[in-house]
Image: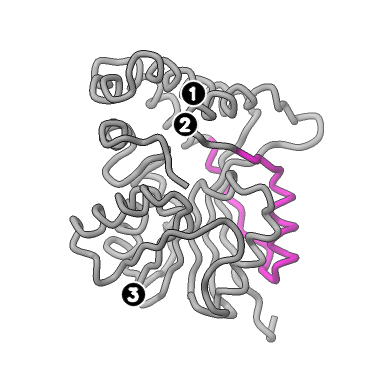
Amino acid sequence: MTTQYSTGVVEGMQALYGKGFLSPGGAEEMAVLLDGVDLAGRTVLDIGCGLGGAAVMLAGTFGARYVTSIDVAGDLVQRARETISEAGLSGKVETRHVTPGPLPFDDVSFDTVFAKDVVCHIPDKAALFGEVARVMVPGGQVICADFTVPSGPDAAPHLYKGWIDAMKAYGLTFHFERLAVYEEAFGRAGLGAPCVKDDTARSLEAARREVAWVRGPNAGLLREALGEEMFARRIDASMRRLDALAGGGIHHTHLLARRLTQAD
């Protein structure tokens, strides 16, 4: 699998989200998500490496002993390698191109599994978290940030359908689910009940800043790289994500859990 991200587009997106990041949040969200998490001396599996910014922070900022970053997009894996090399972390971070399906690692291979805004692209959450638990040591930690949707009378799929449609222009698909689906998947996988933190307010402010940026004078590089038609779609996608968050149609959620041990 490859993406539609040319060099110009990648540079433009990094101007928006920060060096090494291709999706909202960037280094700011990494700091929030990993606040209080001790990765010193731990091995980490980074699912969905993108441009490598998260892997660089996991190893360089948060002290992970070794990070294995994977992605289904081969071109992004290559770009991540370049980001990691530029940061001088090639000895602590490796990248792998993988195919969708079971994770290509032995049982109990990692102390920690990290997934930032990637599970929403995977339809079978239970299968994924089953694999996450399999490759993680007992007592190991899963750290997940993702978009979830409300349930019951608060459900409003029309508020995020426009965002889904807008992002199809980038070859991206979304499979949004309720928080309860994640919690059930964790339980079935042998993971403990997650500590859940609502990150929607911070994500909403980031979305507002993004809309202001893409509609402002500093978006010239991205506009030039995308061309007028795709740039207009980028603005539309940013505005629709803002509408979905502001209207309550979608939430941004942080989940942290442990793989259960025999003593639990």
Q: CA distance from mark 3 to mark 2?
A: 34 Å
Confirm or deny contact between disc 1 and disc 2 (CB under 8 A). yes
Quadrant of residue 39 in the image? Answer: bottom left
Disc 2: which residue = 170
Q: Measuring 48% from the left and 36% from the top, which residue is drawn there?
A: 203
Confirm or deny contact between disc 3 and disc 2 (CB under 8 A). no
Q: Is residue 224 above or below residue 58?
A: above
What is the image's colouring?
A: one colour
Query: In this picture, which residue range is highlighted in magenta?
Result: 174-200
Q: CA distance from mark 1 to mark 3?
A: 37 Å
Q: Nearer the viewer, residue 200 or 26?
A: 26
Residue 65, numbered label = 3
- Amino acid on which disc 1 is placed: Ala
Disc 1: which residue = 237
Neighbour class for label 2 at 10 Å: few (<14), some, many (≥20)? few
Q: Position of residue 189 (x, y in %)?
A: 70, 67
Neighbour class for label 3 at 10 Å: few (<14), some, many (≥20)? some
